[in-house]
Image (cartoon, grey):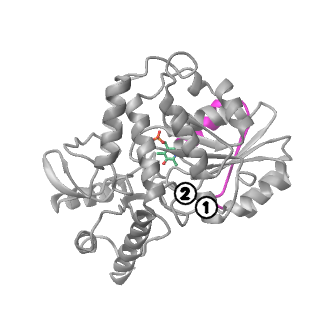
């Protein structure tokens, strides 16, 4: 392969990406490439990445347990904080059990590949996160994509295939569109056809449901309806890592078979302690989730007044620009106005569907949001 040629292609097609350097924590105001900006694109939705009590917990774990974990969880890397974390996660999601993984990416590839066999079928929403797509690729099962959140298309595809078994898998909150999957319908379809249902709560945890517990709480469902609830500790929980919640047998099975669980070093104790602190924060501060919801209402209302239509169900508010170059320029102009909203392009979204992916935090003020809407309306096409 000619790497230089490939790089030139990416640059010519406005698909080349580079890294920004953050010089301060993920807060509403942060320092990027040496410049103070308003951050309207973090996944740290509750704004707790710099919370003193959580940092204190992580520091204490660092002092007690040291830096690295020293091994995979099945060898030498499992520490007492994991037991605490998994108990807390099961309580938080209302499941029998929970199993922590190193990242959401690893939970998805590990669980999907471990749970689906070669004579089975995986039905996957066409807008699912890349880690789900990769999990499907790694599994030996047949993979069938269904139209986004389209239960009729899903039913038709299932009837076409008559699967021997397998799974329906979906983002609960879609990471680039911010809409919510029709989980009650999917649960019914899964039951009707004897399929497992897996939901990825990466952007649901800490955001949807009355007290921020995610998709189960949002829809009033239980682990009997959604067999596998995956979530991350890296977004609203403001640490790193992820988890699978479900029945005891499910977690026990994954512990023994998910390769990304088995063959990777456990998270550092301080990271696990921060995750515990983050979940405890959400449990103790339902008002933070309420504040986030209020911000979503306020911000989308303001956009609407300017003729910019935007979804407002979750903290992810995509503003579709279209062309890759236009989206990149819009993002650059916003940065000049001291706002950081990166553009999301192919391959993360379809070609020609490049967008500014605005995300809100509970800690954004009305002044911050007014300013961002004022700047956005200067160059976003209105209806
Ligand atoms: C971020 C994300 C993941 C991956 O989680 P990490 O902890 O960042 O690896 C998985 N699924 C969805 C929907 C995500 O948005």
On residue 217, which mark appears? 1
Q: Is residue 141 magenta?
A: yes
Task: State yes or no: Cβ of the residue under disc 2 lies below 8 Å from any atom of ligand 1.
Answer: no
The residue that appears at 33% across and 55% down in the rendered structure is 47
Relative vertical location of residue 255 with respect to residue 296 in this rendering, above or below? above
Local crowd at mark 1 within 10 Å, few (<14), some, or many (≥20)? some
Relative vertical location of residue 123 with respect to residue 368 in this rendering, above or below? above
According to the image, label 2 marks what residue?
213
The range drawn in magenta is: 131-149
Can see residue 79?
A: yes
Measured as percent of width and height from the top left, residue 67 is found at 34, 23
Q: Secondary structure at mark 2?
A: loop
Relative vertical location of residue 151 with respect to residue 88 in this rendering, above or below? below
Q: Secondary structure at mark 1?
A: helix
| Distance of label 2 from label 1 (alpha carbons) | 6 Å
Relative vertical location of residue 10 with respect to residue 339 in this rendering, above or below? above
CB under 8 Å between callouts 2 and 1?
A: yes
On the rendered image, what quadrant is the N terminus found in?
A: top left
The residue that appears at 28% across and 71% down in the rendered structure is 369
């Amino acid at each position: 392969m000619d790497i230089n040629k490939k790089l030139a292609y990416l640059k010519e097609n406005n698909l080349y990406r580079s890294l920004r350097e953050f010089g301060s924590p993920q807060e509403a105001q942060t320092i990027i490439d040496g410049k103070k900006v308003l951050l309207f694109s973090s996944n740290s939705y509750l704004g707790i990445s710099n919370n003193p009590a959580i940092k204190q917990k992580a520091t204490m774990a660092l002092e007690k347990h040291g830096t690295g974990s020293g091994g995979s969880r099945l060898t030498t890397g499992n520490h007492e904080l994991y037991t605490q974390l998994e108990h807390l996660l099961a309580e938080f999601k209302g499941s029998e059990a929970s199993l922590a993984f190193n990242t959401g990416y690893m939970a998805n590839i590990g669980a999907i590949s471990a749970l689906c066999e070669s004579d089975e079928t995986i039905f996957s929403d066409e807008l699912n996160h890349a880690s789900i797509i990769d999990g499907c690729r790694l599994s030996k099962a047949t993979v069938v994509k269904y139209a986004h959140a389209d239960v009729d298309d899903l039913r038709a595809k299932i009837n076409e295939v008559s699967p021997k078994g397998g799974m329906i898998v979906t983002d609960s909150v879609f990471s680039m569109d911010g809409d919510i999957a029709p989980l009650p319908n999917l649960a019914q379809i899964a039951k009707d056809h004897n399929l497992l249902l897996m939901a990825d709560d990466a952007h649901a945890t800490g955001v949807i449901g009355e007290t921020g517990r995610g998709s189960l709480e949002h829809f009033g469902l239980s682990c009997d309806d959604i067999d596998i609830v995956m979530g991350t500790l890296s977004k609203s929980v403001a640490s790193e890592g992820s988890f699978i919640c479900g029945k005891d047998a499910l977690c026990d099975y994954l512990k023994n078979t998910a390769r990304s669980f088995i063959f990777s070093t456990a998270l550092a104790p301080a990271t696990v302690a921060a995750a515990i602190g983050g979940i405890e924060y959400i449990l103790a501060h339902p008002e933070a989730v309420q504040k986030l919801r209020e911000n979503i209402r306020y911000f989308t209302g303001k956009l609407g007044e300017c003729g910019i239509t935007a979804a407002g169900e979750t903290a992810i508010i995509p503003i579709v620009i279209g062309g890759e170059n236009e989206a990149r320029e819009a993002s650059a102009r916003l940065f000049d106005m001291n706002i950081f909203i990166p553009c999301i392009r192919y391959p993360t979204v379809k070609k020609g569907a490049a967008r500014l992916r605005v995300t809100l935090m509970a800690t954004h003020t009305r002044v911050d949001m007014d300013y961002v809407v004022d700047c956005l309306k200067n160059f976003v096409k209105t209806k």
